[in-house]
Every structure is written in structure tokens, then in C-alpha cells.
Image (tube, rainbow, N blue to C red):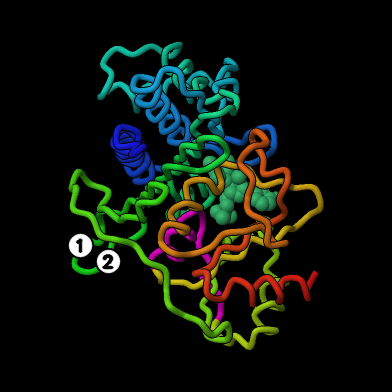
Amino acid sequence: MGFEKELATALEAVREASEICRKVQKEIAGSSLEKDDRSPVTIADFASQAVVCRILTDAFPNDPIIGEETAADLLSDERRPFLDRVVGLLTPANPGVHAETVCGWIDAGRGDGGDRFWTLDPIDGTKGFLRGEQYAVSLALIVDGQIVVSLLGCPNLSAEDGWDRDTGCLFSAVRGKGATLRRLDGSNETKPVRVSGTGKASAARFCESVESGHSAHGRSSQIAALLGIESTPVRLDSQAKYGVVARGEADAYLRLPTKAGYREKIWDHAGGVLVVEEAGGKVSDVDGKPLEFTHGRELSANRGVIVSNGLIHDALLEAVARTA
Ligand SMILES: Nc1ncnc2c1ncn2[C@@H]1O[C@H](COP(=O)(O)O)[C@@H](OP(=O)(O)O)[C@H]1O
Ligand SMILES: [Mg+2]
Ligand SMILES: [Mg+2]
Ligand SMILES: [Mg+2]
């Protein structure tokens, strides 16, 4: 199956959501609040989830969506002004839309898994978004446990080679059909995406999370030292890290477990994984096992994530094991 309709619908959804995110990021002050787990969320996270869920549900009414956000975080009286701002972001494209309708769109992302479902991170890297740095809109379709379509909209990641640098870029992949880069505007010009050819682990350029609470920075420098790597890792937020490995600007992305018990969420990876794999790279957990997208909202069978150009993957896993 070619998944043409799925890809076209997902491209439209990620583009529309990214446009809203860009608009909010220009006037970000006062646009965020804290969730029960103390992590930040902004009006753009909710608006992005609403837009993507609306577009997906229109096109594929039977497909469940597992999204990060829930409208429950907007429903107290004191948060009503915040909800009204989310509605305001959706009004230009949906004149007269009501708060209840918007909450319904957001909660279309509360689906369960199954044989065929979508997973959505409406803004991955919310902390980066708030700092004016990298973030991504991440969307993937999973069928029978396999990611078959994946997209990463990266509004603050420059497109390469003469493309307008301010446009941002959009990675996509369909299983068996390769990975592709587009500008984030309406243009449909595409470029193939390929990982680097770096075969010597000592020459590897790492990237990792900005947030040391999300990935153990100390351990990644031990791993780099073991491999004889002298360059310092590039730190950037969000699944944009998958994008930079996919297009060969970095050779590996290490996400090393921190405090015991944290399980990675499927939406923090699904959009990036297939882009890297279809670009010729490899993704596994720290034990070398493939990521399993068949256990609901979490990657509960995996610990950490190692992403590479493929060529240096075994060397990375060996060094990871030696620092365990
Ligand atoms: N203790 C933890 N360990 C690993 N990841 C965590 C974490 N706490 C939060 N995260 C996840 O890290 C994601 C951001 O990753 P990165 O640091 O690569 O930008 C967050 O996504 P959101 O920003 O969508 O909430 C969040 O889901
Ligand atoms: Mg979050
Ligand atoms: Mg995320
Ligand atoms: Mg998020």
C-alpha cells in the first residue's frame, strides 16, 4: 500500500499546525502554563493538537490518535482565558468555532493504540519552543506495530542549499520509499534525505538534548571519550535531532536513561524514527533492541534511544554497554 492519502493529509496537518506554532512563538510571553507533572505547555501545543486531530479525523474517522495533550488541562475556571486564546488561534481557519468543539478536537488525541493508529506530539521540545529555539511537530502512522508514515515539521531548522532559510523544514518518510525534505511553506519541491557516511566512530559528531534531565550528559561524554571523539556534542531540543542525523549533519543522537523508571513516550520518537531509518540510518534502544510501538503510550519495553547513521551503531552500543 502506498499510503499516498495518509502522507498528503499528514503533510497538510503538520504544515497548518506549524504555522500556528510560528505565529505564537513570535509573541510567546504569557502563553504557557504548567501541567500536573510540572512540565510546561503552551497555547500552541493545544492549538497544534486540535488542528492535526481535526484534519486527521476528517480524512480517517476510524483511526485512533494517541496525542500528548488533553483538554482536561484547560477546563478549570482559572484556565478559561487560556482556553479562549487557544480558540482564538483556531478561529481564522474555523470562523465562529466554539470552545467545546476545540476541546473535542484536542481530545480526539486521547485514543488507544490498536492495529492502526496515529501518534502526535503537537509540539515536541516545548522548552525549546519557549526559549525561541528548536521544536518539532511530530506525527506518525503505526500499522501492525510498524511505523509506516512519519513526519517532522521543524519550523526553526533551516532548510539547506539555497532554500529560504527562514521557511523551516519538513521531513517525511514512507516505509520502503525513502525519506524526503520539503520546505515548510506550501512548496512541494522535495529533496531526498541521506545519513552521513562517517564510518569511523572517533570522527562521529553527536547531538543530544539541551535538557540534562532528559538524557544523561555525563554518560554521553564518557561514551565519546571511550570512542576517542574530541568534538563536543551539539545540543538541540526536540526530534529535530532525528532530522539532523537523517540529513547527515550529525552522525548520532544519544538519549541515555536518567532517573530510574522514566519511560520514553511514543510521540517523542515515532515521527523521527522512520525518517532516520528511511534515510539509511539505524535506531535502537541502549541494549540494541528495536523500539516497540505496541505497548500503548510508552516505549515500556525499551530503555533510552540510540540513533545513528547505521555505520557506527555497533561501536556506539558497545561503548554504551561499557558505561552501564
Ligand atoms: N525525565 C525525562 N527523561 C526523558 N525525556 C523526558 C523526561 N521528561 C520529559 N521528557 C520528554 O522530553 C521531551 C523533549 O525532549 P528533548 O529534550 O529532546 O527536547 C519532552 O517532550 P515535550 O516537549 O513534547 O513535552 C518530554 O516528553
Ligand atoms: Mg510536553
Ligand atoms: Mg515531546
Ligand atoms: Mg510535546
Q: Is 92 above or below relative to 169? A: above
| Residue 40, percent from left and from top | 58, 41
- Residue 247 appears in which quarter of the rendering? bottom left
Locate the N terminus by quadrant. top left
| Residue 26, percent from left and from top | 34, 46
Count all numbered tags in the image, as a single digit. 2
Q: Which residues are magenta?
A: 232-247
- Residue type, mark 2 in image: Glu
Q: Secondary structure at mark 2?
A: loop
Is 112 in front, or is 256? 112
The residue that label 1 is drawn on is: 163
Q: Does residue 235 belong to the magenta stretch?
A: yes
C-alpha distance separating marks 1 and 2: 6 Å
Q: Is the CB of mark 1 within 8 Å of ligand 1? A: no
- For ligand 3, which image quadrant applies? top right
Q: Residue furthest front?
A: 1
Is 104 in front, or is 187? 187
| Residue 74, percent from left and from top | 55, 22
Is 28 in front, or is 216? 216
